[in-house]
Image: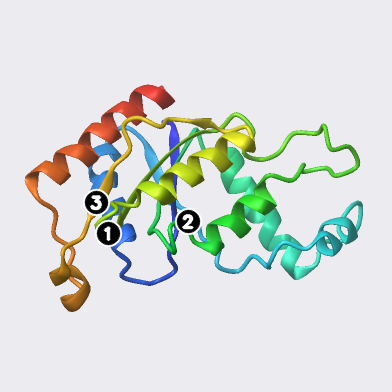
Amino acid sequence: MKHLLFIIGSFRKESFNRQLAKIAEDYLKDRYEISYLDFNDIPFMNQDLEIKGQGQHLSHDQEHIYRVRQEILKADGIWIFTPEYNHSYPGLLKNLFDWLSRPMDISNFANPTAVQGKKVTASGAGGKNKTASCRAKLNDMLEYIKMDVMKEPQTGIALGMEAWVKGEFKLTEEQLNEIKEQAEKFAEFVG
């Protein structure tokens, strides 16, 4: 069975995007093994950490980076669910992909990365912009680091004021159909 890895762009336990991922998971769980990437323990990108670990015993921070890279390598497809922060994607995603864009063996920068050629798509739940700016910038970065990006369809959910005030996540039938369509297209894309 092929494996999909879901990445949530928020560390908030009950984030709307984690809830959106659970809905997508329901559409795909009979066809794929699905797991969620735990990356809240990786350090900020720092070349000193990267260089220090080559050919030596890994430090605690380097072990976290190694674990994340191994999870990425096992995935046949990656689906990112993210909020939009200040017209872009959250810094935690930038940090994650800064690490993942680096060669696994830095002795030669032509060496492969963990994400190179990986099939990826994105969705987001947020304000009235439906995470459109975030996803556009994220798609650009993912293509730049040589990932195989499925840009259409991507689902953007505009959450009503009730969601923000009460912390409730409810989708309309139309929004559910959008995430279902993206799940079907991503399944075709991944194969």
Q: Which mark sits nearer the N-terminus, 3 or 2?
A: 2
- At horizontal 31% and vertical 32% (from top left) the residue drawn is 153
Give the distance between the C-alpha atoms of the residues marked 1 and 3, in whole angstroms: 12 Å
- How many C-alpha atoms fall within 10 Å of the one at disc 1: few (<14), some, or many (≥20)? some
Regarding mark 1 in the picture, which secondary structure is present there? helix
Q: Which residue is mark 1?
A: 19
Q: Position of residue 96 (x, y in %)?
A: 60, 56
Q: Is the residue under label 1 in contact with that under label 2 (CB below 8 Å)?
A: no
Residue 46: name its quadrant: bottom right
Q: Which mark sits nearer the N-terminus, 1 or 3?
A: 1
Please name the amino acid that badge 3 sits on.
Answer: Ile
For the N terminus, give its image quadrant. Answer: top left
Please determine whether, in this image, residue 157 is positioned above or below residue 151. below
Single out the mark in the foreground, 1 or 3: 3
183, 74: nearer the viewer? 183
Horizontally, residue 65 falls left or right of residue 71, namely: right
Q: Position of residue 59 (x, y in %)?
A: 80, 67
For the C terminus, give its image quadrant. Answer: top left
Q: Is the residue under label 2 in contact with that under label 3 (CB below 8 Å)?
A: no
Please determine whether, in this image, residue 15 is positioned above or below residue 191. below
Single out the mark in the foreground, 2 or 1: 2
26, 137: nearer the viewer? 137
107, 130: nearer the viewer? 130
Please name the amino acid that badge 1 sits on.
Answer: Gln
Q: Position of residue 129 (x, y in %)?
A: 29, 53
Horizontally, residue 124 falls left or right of residue 41, namely: left
Horizontally, residue 69 falls left or right of residue 88, namely: right
Q: Which residue is mark 2?
A: 89
Give the distance between the C-alpha atoms of the residues marked 3 and 2, in whole angstroms: 15 Å
- At horizontal 20% and vertical 60% (from top left) the residue drawn is 159
Q: Which residue is mark 3?
A: 157
Q: Which mark sits nearer the N-terminus, 2 or 1?
A: 1
